[in-house]
Amino acid sequence: MPSAPTRAVPNDLEAYWIPFTPNRAFKAAPRLIARAKDMHYYTPEGRAVLDGTAGLWCTNAGHNRDPIVAAISAQAAELDYAPAFQFSHPQAFELASRVAALAPGDLDHVFFCNSGSEAVDTALKIALAYHNIRGEGARTRLIGRERGYHGVGFGGISVGGIVTNRKFFGTLIGGVDHLPATYNREQQAFTQGEPDWGAHLADELERIVALHDASTIAAVIVEPMAGSTGVLPPPKGYLQRLRAICDKHRLLLIFDEVITGFGRLGHAFAAERYGVVPDLITFAKGITSGTVPMGGVILRKSIYDSFMRGPEHVIELFHGYTYSAHPLACAAALATLDLYREESLFERARKLEPLWGQAAMGLKDLPGVLDIRTLGLTAGIDLAARPDAAGRRAYDAMVQAFHEENLVIRVTGDTLALTPPLIVSEDEIADMFERVARVIKAVAQ
Ligand SMILES: Cc1ncc(COP(=O)(O)O)c(C=O)c1O
């Protein structure tokens, strides 16, 4: 595989407003990545950097995999674009069938969009419209969860529960309530896998229903494992309990599987791991292994069928994106799903999970480590905040990891997150945590 030519570092970093990044600090000491292959990035100078985060939890098959690159190139030469409304192209149908086949139960229809944020807003809109067309238009409330991350659309930040993502943006959408977060350090610290404590927190949904009445509630949305807030595995039994309460009150249950989908927890979807069938699943990221933007919603047959009434020439759902099921994204997704299957990458994640968890727990006694949580191929490591600057220690750790340890890690607040591509080897896992250990020691002062 020939490597791409190394391009010059841009000499003016000013124009680009980098998302979710302190721009002035970045531009003073940039972290630039010029190319990638498998488990590694390469800086413009050619330095190899180990990818501890699968990009942003998305490059599950590893970087620049040949079959995916070839599929995207071939598709670009064959069909660049077909209108997403009133027309379509064959790969969109093939992909929808493939995704539906991976989903549990009767979740057998797929609506495509371009990101996790769009997937969440699409799912919320489908939930509202579903009740509306069935004559239960009073069901408009949406229930999210504290510390939840559901992207950055107005729907997503409204049901989301990360304060900084909400407080600058006005009153958000109305009629939203939140379940409590499932994390309690005193009860759960240093748990590998699902903690024993916390299933009862699902019962808070009963309190919310009692307050608003079920007849006003459309849907409940949760991440099966809260990812972006810092890796919070669900307590044992929690998701099952949530499902039971939703059934009792006929609330739609949405699993936001943008991170947990496509192998991160050792299965196609976390729904499978927990034996819980939600009504809708949102996905993005791993569907194309991060190569081309794509997201979507998988929904139960009964929901789809509810829309398929009315006159046949009338649009059933007034929603969609110019780039829904874009041909390049479909080609990338089909090749990615092939690779996941051929290399048994979901099973691989499942097999590596105990070793991964033990390696992460090896950092337990390092200075300033308050908690470590692991699930599937994810790990969250809480560091003690510096007294005068919340988030500073973890930020310093990320900078140290990139420049001194040739490692990409992710930070949120004072939590480090590690979520490697599913092709990670046992040696690379050991090496990764050795590097993280040195980083934690370096920022301990
Ligand atoms: C659970 C969840 N939902 C939604 C999103 C938003 O996805 P995107 O950044 O593609 O809009 C993310 C992104 O990390 C996520 O983790």
Image (spheres, rainbow, N blue to C red):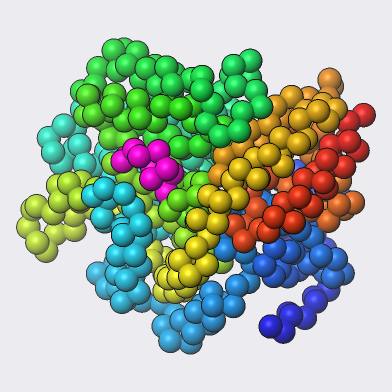
**Residue depicted at x 84% and y 20%:** 387
* Whether residue 354 can be seen here: yes
Task: Indicate whether 277 appears above or below 235.
Answer: below
Q: Provide residue 192's location: percent of width, then percent of height.
A: 61, 33
**Residue depicted at x 49% and y 84%:** 74
**Residue depicted at x 65% and y 23%:** 189
Task: Indicate whether 277 appears above or below 292.
Answer: above
Considering depth in this image, is 177 or 347 the residue closer to the camera? 347
- First to last magenta residue range: 269-278
Considering depth in this image, is 19 or 77 the residue closer to the camera? 77
Residue 271 is one of the magenta-drawn residues: yes
Q: Provide residue 48's location: percent of width, then percent of height.
A: 81, 65
Residue 321 is one of the magenta-drawn residues: no
The quarter holding residue 62 reads bottom right
Q: Provide residue 217's location: percent of width, then percent of height.
A: 27, 26
Q: Provide residue 115's location: percent of width, then percent of height.
A: 48, 54
Locate the C terminus and report the quarter of the image it occupies.
top right
Considering depth in this image, is 345 or 441 the residue closer to the camera? 345
Left or right of 412, for residue 385: right
**Residue depicted at x 39% and y 30%:** 239
Locate the N terminus and report the quarter of the image it occupies.
bottom right
